[in-house]
């Protein structure tokens, strides 16, 4: 009986610890703006890198989009809006490419879901979609559509 109570107490304290951690995590995100007005200030670094990695993923679909002045302009505009340098973006892309594709997409997805401003997320999607359409790669276009549908429904 004492062993049972001891185990129950341990489970109770572990649950209390995990619950407190979850509350602290929620507090961090609760203080984030619901409307993104200044992306360089309003977004966490992981969210900024997720946006850049999505744009780069769409641009890298084939050589048409990879060398497109329009696609490069879109990417550079986002770098400026997010307050990121090209070196920071390249570092993020290299890290993303070093992971398995599934893991990389999961990290991007989770970071994008954290953004509460769905209109802002749709604006990211419009630019990702524009780059994907430049590539003409139907698989990339379909993948981005599916990914953003998932992100926007969370």
Image: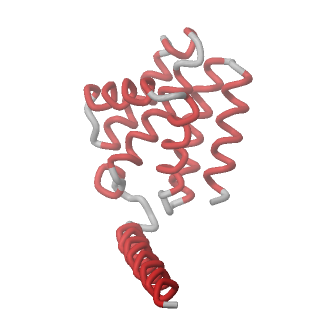
Q: Quadrant of the C terminus?
A: bottom right
* Residue depicted at x 28% and y 42%: 83
Comparing 18 with 2, the one in front is 2
Comparing 68 with 93, the one in front is 93
**Image-quadrant location for residue 136:** top right
Position in image of residue 129 (x %, y %): 62, 33
* Residue depicted at x 52% and y 90%: 1
Asked if residue 119 lies left or right of residue 150, the reply is left
Comparing 146 with 4, the one in front is 4
Asked if residue 104 lies left or right of residue 41, the reply is right
* Residue depicted at x 46% and y 29%: 99
Q: Is residue 135 above or below residue 122?
A: above
* Residue depicted at x 36% and y 51%: 39
Q: How is the image coloured?
A: secondary structure
Comparing 69 with 154, the one in front is 154
Q: Is residue 56 above or below residue 9?
A: above
Asked if residue 45 lies left or right of residue 144, the reply is left
Position in image of residue 68 (x %, y %): 50, 15
How many numbered marks have been drawn onto this rendered protein structure?
0
**Image-quadrant location for residue 113:** bottom right
**Image-quadrant location for residue 126:** top right
Position in image of residue 49 (x %, y %): 39, 39
Q: Is residue 78 above or below residue 119?
A: above
Position in image of residue 92 (x %, y %): 35, 31
């Amino acid at each position: 009986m004492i062993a049972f109570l001891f185990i129950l107490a341990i489970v109770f304290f572990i649950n209390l610890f995990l619950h407190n951690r979850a509350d602290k995590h929620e507090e961090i995100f609760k203080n984030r703006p619901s409307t993104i007005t200044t992306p360089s200030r309003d977004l966490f670094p992981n969210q900024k890198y997720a946006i850049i990695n999505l744009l780069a993923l769409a641009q890298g679909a084939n050589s048409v989009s990879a060398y497109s002045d329009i696609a490069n302009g879109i990417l550079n505009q986002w770098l400026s809006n997010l307050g990121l340098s090209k070196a920071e973006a390249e570092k993020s892309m290299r890290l993303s490419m070093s992971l398995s594709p599934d893991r990389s997409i999961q990290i991007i997805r989770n970071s994008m879901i954290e953004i509460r401003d769905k209109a802002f997320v749709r604006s990211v999607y419009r630019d990702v979609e524009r780059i994907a359409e430049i590539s003409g790669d139907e698989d990339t276009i379909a993948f981005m559509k599916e990914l953003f549908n998932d992100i926007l429904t969370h």
